[in-house]
Image: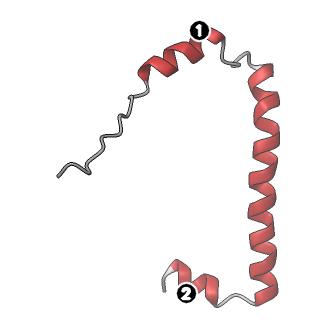
Amino acid sequence: MSLWQSYRNLQPRTRLFLGLGLISWAGAGLLITEQAEKKFDLVPTDKDREELDEAVPKIRIVDSTGR
């Protein structure tokens, strides 16, 4: 039995609680991440941001109406 079928066989109330639990877990992770970065001194500096900007590829849009 596939994972999707197992999920679908759960009672609707159980699926609701499972979904709310996953959403809560993700929300807590988003809230805690910033505090953990500060605690472990992983906050990016201006130099890090500049290096990232240089590493990101540049995209040029070419107008192709002249075909």
In percent of width and height, residue 28 lies at 81, 48
Residue beneath the point at 80% across and 68% down? 20
Say whether residue 64 is left or right of residue 28.
Answer: left
Q: Nearer the viewer, mark 1 or mark 2?
A: 1
Furthest-left residue in this view: 67
Q: Nearer the viewer, residue 12 or 67?
A: 67
Viewer-side residue, 2 vs 60: 60
Above or below — where is 35 with respect to 10? Answer: above
Here the colouring is: secondary structure
Q: Secondary structure at mark 1?
A: helix
Q: Which mark is residue 59?
A: none
Label 2 sits on residue: 5
| Whole-number angstrom distance, CA of label 1 to CA of label 2 | 49 Å
23 horizontally vs 65: left or right:
right
Q: Quadrant of residue 36?
A: top right
> What's the residue type where badge 2 is placed?
Gln
Residue at point 79% right, 65% down?
21
Q: Say which element carries label 2.
A: helix
Q: Is residue 27 above or below residue 16?
A: above
Q: Amino acid at mark 1?
A: Lys
* Sequence-earlier tag: 1 or 2: 2
**The image quarter in which residue 34 lies:** top right
Residue 47 at x, y percent in the picture: 59, 8
Judged left or right of residue 1, residue 39 is right
Residue 44 higher or lower than 26, as above or below: above
Identify the residue at image location x=78%, y=82%: 14
Give coordinates of residue 5: x percent, y percent.
Answer: 55, 87
Q: Which residue is mark 1?
A: 47
Residue at x 81% of width, y 75% of height: 17
Bin the neighbour count of mark 2 within 10 Å (Cα to Cα): few under 14, some 14-19, many 20 and up. few
Where is residue 58 shown, x and y percent of the image? 39, 29
